[in-house]
Image (tube, grey):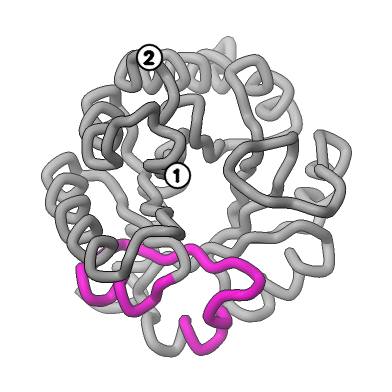
Amino acid sequence: MNTKFLHTDRMRRFQQAGLYLVTSQALSRGRSTLEIVDAALAGGVRLIQLREKEMPMPDFLRLAELLRARTADAKALLIINDRVDVALAVGADGVHLGQADFPIAPARRLAPDLIIGASTHSPAEAQAAERAGASYINIGPLFPTQTKTWSGEFLGLEGLKVIARLATIPWTVMGGIKPEHVPALIQAGAHTIAIVTAITAAADPAQAARDLLALLRTRHRTPDT
C-alpha cells in the first residue's frame, strides 16, 4: 500500500471513530491500561491513544506492542503519545505530539504514512501545526482536568469556536470532557471527542464507552438519517 493511500485510509477511519480514548493508568482506579483498553474495545471504541508519561520506556514499549496487537484485532487505530520512535517500532497508526515534543515537520519526513496529531492551545499554535504538516489538531484543554498540569486559561466553548473556525484540517477536542458536555461540543462542530477519565475511571469502562458512543451517534444523527 503506498504511503499517501495508507495515510488517507487511516484518516478516513480516524474521522469515523467519534470517540477517542486517551489512556492514563494513574487515573484508572487501580486497573491496568491493558484492562481499560480491552474494555473500551469491547464497548466499541476504535481510536486509542497510548499516553503514559511516567512509565519507564521498556514498559511503555512492551505495552505499545500489546496494544498494537489488540487494536489490530479489533480493527481499531492506535496512536502513540510523544514518541515517533515507538510508533514506528510497533507499527502504530499514528503519533500525537505536544508543543514541547518532537517537531511535526521532521516527524512527517520520518513517517509520511502516520497520522500525526498536534496539541494546540491557541489559534497561532493551531495554524503553525497545520503549516508543519499535522494530520489533525487537538484543541484544548477545554475544561479543568486531572490529566494535565495547566497554568493557562481553559479554552471553554468560546475558545474552541475561535480555533475551530480557523482549522482547515480535522480537529479533536480534549480536557475535562464529561458526557454532559457532549451536546454543546457537537453543536460547536466537534466530530471527534478525546476523553480520559470518563472511561478510565468509570465503574464499568465498557458500558461507559457504549453510552458515550450512543450519545455521539444520537447527537450527530439528522432527521433524514
Q: Give residue 187's quadrant in the image.
A: top right
| The furthest residue to the top | 223
Residue pictured at 36% horizontal, 59% vertical:
55
Q: Nearer the viewer, residue 56 or 182?
A: 56
**What's the residue type where badge 2 is placed?**
Ala
Question: Alpha-carbon distance for marks 2 and 1?
Answer: 17 Å
Tell me where residue 38 appears, x and y as whole percent: 21, 33
N-term-proximal mark, 2 vs 1: 1
Please state the total of marks drawn on the protein image.
Answer: 2
Residue pictured at 43% horizontal, 43% vertical:
24
Placement of the N terminus among the 4 image quadrants: bottom left
Identify the residue under disc 1: 22
Question: Under tag 2, what secondary structure?
Answer: loop
Residue pictured at 44% horizontal, 25% vertical:
201
Would you place residue 162 above or below residue 137 in this image?
A: above
Would you place residue 181 above or below residue 100 in this image?
A: above
Identify the residue under disc 2: 203
Query: Can residue 186 be seen in the rendering of this structure?
Result: yes
Q: Give residue 16's quadrant in the image.
A: top left
Residue pictured at 39% horizontal, 76% vertical:
84
**What's the residue type where badge 1 is placed?**
Val
Question: Under tag 1, what secondary structure?
Answer: strand
* Magenta segment: 83-107
Tell me where residue 28 appears, x and y as whole percent: 39, 32
Badge nearest the viewer, 2 or 1 = 2
Q: Nearer the viewer, residue 58 or 225?
A: 58
Residue 43: numbered disc: none
